[in-house]
Image (cartoon, rainbow, N blue to C red):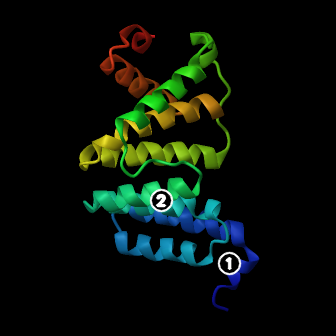
Amino acid sequence: SGNDYWECYYHLCIDLFSAAAEMEQCVGNTDKCLVLINEIFDNGKRLEDKLRAFYVQIQIFGSQGSLEEAVRTGFDLLKELGVRIPRKPRVWNVVAETLKTKKMLKGRSDESLISGSRLEDPVELMKLELLHLVSMYCYVWQGSDFLPIIFLRSMQYSLQHGINEYTPYAFANFAVLLVNSGDIDEGDR
């Protein structure tokens, strides 16, 4: 009766409802997608189980032109996952994060960066996926002040947790930040 299937087949329900929400979002059935997302939000026991639904929700906000809502929702979710993005980034935030990233790179060869371990943890990977998604909406929305911090956090996560499909994006954006700040040799590396 009712939601007994969530009790008996919890993990299967999370996977099926998440996949169905992603599919409905892909084909443009926003109303059906939102029903599925709400089912996950109502029955999901842990934040980790709801991550795919939140990701789709952020995509819906973005596709509907609610870019600020997409960015704010992404930032709120990242905060719950332990990734803090300043609400009003200042130059000193960017300088501090750049120095932190440079320190993480110090002593690491190009070869060690390329052949590093792969990121396998799904929650850590979702953090990078969210950073990537939110950066796209920040770029379109008037949130470009957030971009350097997002790019630096993406780089730091790749260095801390391993390489993944978002690592080239993180490295390229870090290089652009370095070149724009006048550190052309390090940006070229």
Q: Which residue: 36% across, 58% down?
A: 70
Residue furthest to the front: 92
The reply, left or right, for residue 86 in relation to residue 78 is left
Residue at mark 2: 76
The mark total stands at 2
The vertical placement of 174 against 144, above or below, is above
Name the residue type under label 2.
Asp
Q: Which residue: 47% across, 31% down?
A: 96
Is disc 2 placed on a helix, strand or loop?
Answer: helix
What distance separates the C-alpha of mark 1 from that of mark 2?
26 Å
The vertical placement of 164 against 142, above or below, is above
Residue 29 appears at what percent x and percent y?
35, 69
Residue at mark 1: 6
Residue 108 image label: none
The reply, left or right, for residue 189 in relation to residue 71 is right
The vertical placement of 144 against 28, above or below, is above
Name the residue type under label 1.
Trp
The vertical placement of 24 against 124, above or below, is below
- Residue 143 appears in the figure: yes
